[in-house]
Amino acid sequence: MTAVSNAMRCGRLISPPSFSGYHHNGLPHATTLAHARPFLPLTLFALILSIFATTSAWAASAADRVEFPADDQGRPLRLYARPERIVSLAPHATEMLFAAGAGGRVVAIDPASDHPAAAVGLPRVSAWPRPDLEALRGAAPDLILLWGAGLRAEQRESVERVAPVWVTDPTRLDEIPQTLRKLGRIAGDPMVAHAQAEQFSERLATLRAAVPDGPPVRVFYQAWGRPLITVSNRDLIGDAIRTCGGENVFGGERAAARQVDPEAVRAARPQLVVLGDGSTTDAPGGEPLARWRGRWIGRPPALVAIAPELLQRPTPRVLEGVDRLCLAIRATVRGAQPSQWPQSSGLPRSP
């Protein structure tokens, strides 16, 4: 009955060999083997077919997934199709998506995203201090963009439970056109992204070519006023200062950003102080003028205010801030008064 049971389980019924077909030692006669031979190949064939079908289905499923450019943490992105519903949880990511021609696929953004105008009316999803997972699920994204700076592993993992994640964190000006091209391939228009990237690279080359010879100008960048926060050369701003022929007085710090004492800044003797926290240079009698124009040893530094979104966000618009920074550094070299500084070199503005 064992042979019958096995055959039935295999979906095929053959006559079991009779006891008369066996020798006394338990081995079957040749006639018995002849009857059993069809069963073995057919069973093996069915097994091979089953394995082949399973393997083919798995291979087809894997082949359907498209591999897109890796993110700035080196993580590959594999999707079954180009994303149609994107959530951006960083202001610079929002700008970059629109610049790369993917604005029509963005369905929600973080509260701080304020550019371009086409993005302002989109639904908002909280990103800080932790992403709002419930709101993310409600947006039904098939891709979520995160900022890499300060992103903890557990934060990424929690967001990945909602949808695939792509982290963007350019820390050098030359990485911005690279990111534009990547986003063009992932979700945007590759031709639009390429054109934007080429324009950015050309404008950056123009700014670099205008840097005068001579020793670098010592620059202090105020990222925040209270408490006083600055940045090192590990940040995009440090690269911008270097690009314009300046020397970041705290550029050698290990952390990308750190709190500093005003006395330490004075001891560093910067020639130019860049206010990058939204402060203005025309606030009479108050901060930051009282801080930076008093109690200096020797000549006080020149002051220039540059809107934070124009120098802190790695987007095509950053070149507007770099342009203003380069003008301030060149004017400092000449000893010109801030009131005599041009506001722009005439470099084309980003859209």
Image (cartoon, helix red, strand yellow):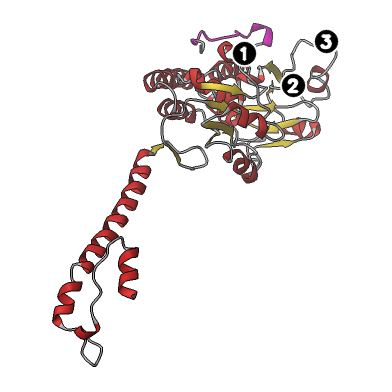
For the residues labelled 3 and 1, say whether their Cβ atoms are less than 8 Å apart.
no
Q: Quadrant of residue 140?
A: top right
- Residue picked out by circle 1: 121
Q: Is residue 129 left or right of residue 252?
A: right
Q: Position of residue 296 (x, y in %)?
A: 79, 25
Is residue 327 on the magenta stretch? no
- Dominant secondary structure, magenta: loop
Q: Residue furthest bottom?
A: 24
Above or below, 52 against 269 in this view is below
Above or below, 283 against 39 in this view is above
> What amino acid is found at the position of numbered circle 3 in the picture?
Pro
Q: Quadrant of residue 184?
A: top left
- Tally of numbered discs: 3
Of the image marks 2 and 1, the number of the one nearer the N terminus? 1
The label nearer to you, 3 versus 1, is 1
At x 36%, y 19%, the residue is: 191
> What amino acid is found at the position of numbered circle 1 in the picture?
Gly
Q: Is residue 57 visible?
A: yes
Of the image marks 3 and 2, the number of the one nearer the N terminus? 3
Label 1 packing within 10 angstroms: few (<14), some (14-19), many (20+): few
Q: CA distance from mark 3 to mark 1?
A: 36 Å
Label 2 packing within 10 angstroms: few (<14), some (14-19), many (20+): few
Of the image marks 3 and 1, the number of the one nearer the N terminus? 1
At x 24%, y 92%, the residue is: 25
- Residue picked out by circle 2: 299
- Residue picked out by circle 3: 284
Element at label 2? loop
* Nearest to the observer: residue 142 or residue 330: 142
Find the magenta span and give its range: 338-348
